[in-house]
Image (cartoon, rainbow, N blue to C red):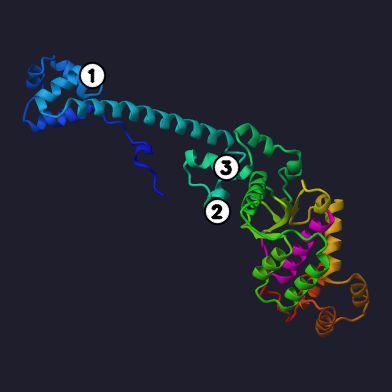
Amino acid sequence: MGTRIEKLTPAIAIHPGEMILDEIKANELTQADFAKKIGMERSQLNEIIKGKRVVNAELAIILEASLGLPAQYWLNLQNQYDLDKVKVEKRAEERVLAITLMTEISEYVSVKYLRKQKVLTGDPVCDIPVIYDIYGVSNNVQLIECYNNPQYARFRKSEKLNIDKTNLIGWVKYSEYIAKSVKTKQFKYDSWKSLKSELRTLICKNKHVHERSQSILSKYGIKLLYQDKAEKAPIDGIAFWSNENPTIAMTLRHKRLDNFAFTLFHELGHVFLHLLGDNTLEIIDLAGNDEEFKATKEEKEANDFASNNLIPEDSWIEFKSREDLYEDDLIDFAHQIGIHPSVVLGRLCFEYNNYKVKTNIVNTIG
């Protein structure tokens, strides 16, 4: 449905004086001659033409007699000008306010990232309400409080991880914002066993992994989103509640199957180990080698959850204890436990900190 004409705000307010000037020219009169005709000083007529004087009822009647257009026509023009002037002035005030607000929060909002996602336009009047909606606030004070929230304190400037706190928070808030519009089924609290089985089968087959993972998790009431990474925001994923559903957002920073599988199971570890006990949690997982971050209780538990549910711990201990391991041994072991060989290879590379192993095992996500 379109906008009603009377609700539109004009670009400028047009004074009836401009119409009077048009009629004077159409009648091939000079301003001096017309001023004499209507009994007015030329300077007074000039002020009306320039919009400095109003067209009142008396002048409207004189204009009707001299130009042949009804008095009501001129009064209507004056009335419309008065209304439009108020609208234009109000719009200007709104724009000044929006520009001021945008300037105030520019260092707290990931404007560049949000524009890349095509949710911001570059027009502060349009963008301020969208920013408030994304960040879940109603004014600049609350937005700055959100930025200074203690839960984001650990994302201070870091030379090791090169973190841009503004972009990191922007990615988190945008992920939460998008998740609100995602519809899924009711969450099944006791679903991990069957969910794990379906995901392991999917990873083993390695076909349409991204799309099928979303479909499988949705069936169990878990939202799965893939969000473009933000500059200097080294995030692998995040786990949080969106309405009544646990939600996972991932950046897909790497194209490897083993990385995707581990990150997904890691986030699911947060869901089933941590989120179920606290629906206010927002667990952000950073990439890289931040030892302080990796040492947290939640991260250790999620890492163990991912490792042991992808590859059973007892099977892994027995396999790794072999003296000589060749590619065929690795593939046979992967088939025995029902997982893709790249997952086994990835864990070996991680535990031995050696990623330069030559192999024919395909690790590209299908």
Q: Is residue 159 left or right of residue 273?
A: left
Q: Nearer the viewer, mark 2 or mark 1?
A: 1
Q: Which residue is identified by label 1?
A: 56
Identified by mark 3, the residue type is Ile
Asked if residue 263 is positioned above or below residue 358 in the image, the reply reads above
Label 2's element? loop
Marked residue nearer the N-terminal end (2 or 1)? 1
Q: Is residue 352 left or right of residue 206?
A: right
Q: Is residue 193 left or right of residue 52?
A: right
Q: Which residue is identified by label 3?
A: 131
* Span highlighted in magenta in the image: 251-274
Mark 1 neighbour density, 10 Å: few (under 14) some (14–19) many (20 or more): few
Q: Residue at x 86, y 56 (%)?
A: 300
Label 3's element? helix
Identified by mark 1, the residue type is Asn
Asked if labels 2 and 3 touch by Cβ distance under 8 angstroms, the answer is no
Asked if residue 213 is positioned above or below residue 286 in the image, the reply reads below
Q: Is residue 277 magenta?
A: no
In this orientation, does residue 75 appear?
Answer: yes
Q: Which residue is identified by label 2?
A: 117
Q: Residue at x 64, y 41 (%)?
A: 136
Q: Is residue 118 left or right of residue 194?
A: left
Alpha-carbon span between mark 2 and mark 1: 53 Å
Q: Nearer the viewer, mark 3 or mark 1?
A: 1
Marked residue nearer the N-terminal end (3 or 1)? 1
Quadrant location of the C terminus? Answer: bottom right
Expressed as whole percent of the image width and height from the top left, the position of residue 60 reads 18, 22
Please name the predominant secondary structure of the magenta segment in the image: helix
| Viewer-nearest residue: 58 or 257 | 58
